[in-house]
Image (spheres, rainbow, N blue to C red):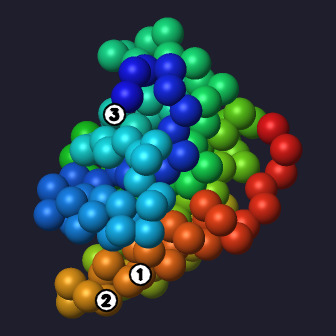
Amino acid sequence: MTKNDAVEILLVEDNPNDAKLAMLALEEVNLANNLIWLKDGAEALDFLFGEGKYEGRNIENRPKIILLDLKMPKVDGIQVLERIKKDDKTKHIPVAVMTSSQEEKDRVSTYDLGVNSYIVKPIDFDQFTDFVKEVGYYWMVVNTPPAK
């Protein structure tokens, strides 16, 4: 993808195994054509707001869904979510948190910030791929977002 291509799914995940499983699951249901994988929260913010190595990117090409891990290096998922939901240009992008954290404080914090979905990652391979397919299908096909 070039830096100004449309992105439908933004996957922000530092664990390469979880990212690969998610991408394979989305490919299986033909939802991975316009997907970009970013490995930490700082890179995600740079991408969304056209900063750093993404300076000059057309930020009007916003993703239809962000799949966001919470526990990441540099900038964690809660900080990413906070910036997304505070900015008028990005606040309507649906964000689904995919995390292994079952901590109540993480759930409360993310919902207070406006997360659209909080999902604890299943450990089982089949459960994880089914979950990613369902999330992708719902947000990419079933959901009707507001007009830009």
Query: Does residue 44 show up?
Result: yes
Task: Residue at 49%, 50% (x, y): give it.
Answer: 9
Direction from residue 22 to residue 144 in the image, left or right: right
Q: Residue under label 3, please give it.
A: 43
Amino acid type shown at disc 1:
Phe
Residue farthest top in this picture: 56
Q: Which residue is mark 1?
A: 131
Q: 51 or 64: nearer the eye?
A: 64
Q: Secondary structure at mark 1?
A: helix
Q: Quadrant of residue 148?
A: top right
- The quadrant of the rendering that contains the N terminus is top left
Sort mark 1 into few (<14), some (14-19) or many (20+) by Cα contacts within 10 Å. Answer: some
Q: Earlier in the sequence, mark 3 or mark 1?
A: 3
Instruction: Report the front residue among 37 and 115.
Output: 37
Number of numbered tags placed on the structure image: 3
Q: Measuring 45% from the left and 61% from the top, which residue is drawn there?
A: 30
Give the residue type at disc 2: Gln
Q: Residue at x 83, y 51 (%)?
A: 146
Q: Which residue is mark 2?
A: 127
* Residue 56 at x, y percent in the picture: 49, 10
Residue 107 location in percent, x, y?
50, 77
